Image (cartoon, rainbow, N blue to C red):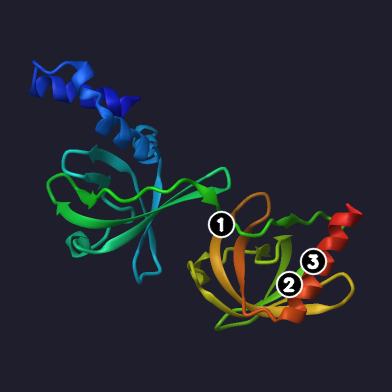
Amino acid sequence: MGLFNRFLDRFSHSSSNVTESEVINHEWVHNFEKYRELINLQDKRQLLEVIIKGGKSSFQTMVIGIDFFSGTFSIDEFSPLLLNPESLVGQTISIRHQSHWQQLDIEATVKEWSEEDSCYSLTLPVINSYQPRRHHQRLALHTDKILKTEINPLYGAPWYATVKDISEGGMRIAISGDLRPHLHKDKLLPKCQIRLDNNIAIQCRGIVRAFTYYPKPSRQTEISIAYQNMSQSHLTDLRRFMSYIEVAA
């Protein structure tokens, strides 16, 4: 493990009389096991998503150092750059990493901003394991089962989209054109209407969870939406439709 070897090198320079067997004691073995996920993120130089409490924007960063002596770890300056990075000192931020449909969520408090090194120092947090990103299994829809949906943004004309996949908790849709200027994470969509196979329409409000623009082969934006305030009767209709599709497949 890269970090472990770096630690041994650092320790040997500071105290040549300490043997390797004395360094690898129970506490250090426990720390390396406890922070295995964080160590892997650093060694593999993985990009991480950062969300500041109370904010809607997200940033990218990387873990660039872990110090068990001081109980801290360091992350690189954000991209895009934060105008006043020192303003985060004392705040708790959320850090996310996604891998194979699973997500690692970390919450840590910023202790210090280093202008010289362009990095943040944070308190080592409790690290949980990767968890499934979704509570509901998504059902992929193929060309023989096309669902159309009408999405009403807060302002402007409705968006007419095709449903790519769907679950009891949300859906992923495709809309022609580049809608990135009109989207942000957690954007409220006052009305999402889906017309099912049997001409039954279900609707609710929606929350934008993620979006991606694909310029090729046909310019379109894909949006992941979580349902909000769907009535029990509409949820029942959706479950019946999904069961029918799964059985027919």
Circle 1 — which element?
A: strand
Q: Residues within 10 Å of mark 2 (few under 14, many from 20)?
A: many
- C-alpha separation, residue under disc 2 versus residue under disc 1: 18 Å
Residue 108 in view, yes or no? yes
Q: Residue at x 89, y 56 (%)?
A: 247
In the visual, does 191 lie left or right of 212? right
Q: Where is the N terminus found, in terms of image quarters?
A: top left
> Mark on residue 212?
1
Going by the numbered disc 1, the residue's amino acid type is Thr
Circle 1 packing at 10 Å, graded few (<14), some (14-19), many (20+), is some
User: Label 3, on which residue?
Assistant: 147
Q: Is residue 119 above or below residue 230?
A: above
| Marks 2 and 3 close (CB-CB < 8 Å) | yes
Secondary structure under badge 3? strand
Q: Amino acid at mark 2?
A: Thr
Which of 169/175 is in front?
Answer: 169
| Residue type at numbered disc 3 | Leu
Q: Is residue 176 above or below residue 45?
A: below
Task: Please name the residue that numbered disc 2 is placed on.
Answer: 149
Residue 198 at x, y = what percent?
A: 90, 73
Instruction: Identify the residue at image location x=12%, y=18%.
Output: 18
Q: Residues within 10 Å of mark 3 (few under 14, many from 20)?
A: some
Answer with left or right where residue 212 lies relative to residue 124.
Answer: right
In primary-sequence order, the first of circles 2 and 1 is: 2
Spatial separation of the CA atoms under disc 2 and disc 3? 7 Å
Does label 3 or label 1 sit earlier along the sequence?
3
Residue 133 location (% of width, % of height): 56, 54
Residue 235, position in %: x, y?
74, 74
Which quarter of the figure has residue 70?
Answer: top left
Residue at left offset 20%, top offset 23%:
23
